[in-house]
Amino acid sequence: MQTIVDVNSVEKSYGLTQGMNNCSFMIYEEDIYGLLGINGAGKRQARTE
């Protein structure tokens, strides 16, 4: 299968607050994924980086 999304070591901070640290994942064609987490967990940031 071919990789269509490859995210490696994404980090995001809001001032001194670290919102995401070393977020990495791969999505392959024809696979279905969901990104779950509590409010403020960084779901939108992982998607928009």
Image: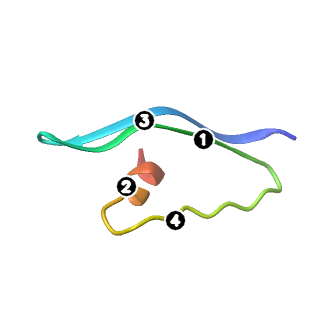
Which of marks 4 and 3 precedes in the sequence?
3
Marks counted in the figure total: 4
Indicate the position of residue 46 as horizontal and vertical percent values. Answer: 44, 49
Q: Mark 3 and mark 4: span between their CA atoms? A: 17 Å
**Residue contact between numbered discs 2 and 4, judged by CB atoms under 8 Å:** no
Q: Which quadrant would the N terminus be assigned to in this image?
A: top right
Please indicate whether residue 23 sits to the left or right of residue 13 in the image: right
Which of marks 3 and 1 precedes in the sequence?
3
The residue beneath circle 1 is 25
The residue beneath circle 2 is 42
Q: Mark 2 and mark 4: span between their CA atoms? A: 10 Å
Q: Residue furthest bottom?
A: 39
The residue positioned 82% from the left and 39% from the top of the image is: 2
Please name the amino acid that badge 1 sits on.
Phe
Q: Mark 2 and mark 3: span between their CA atoms? A: 11 Å
The residue beneath circle 3 is 10
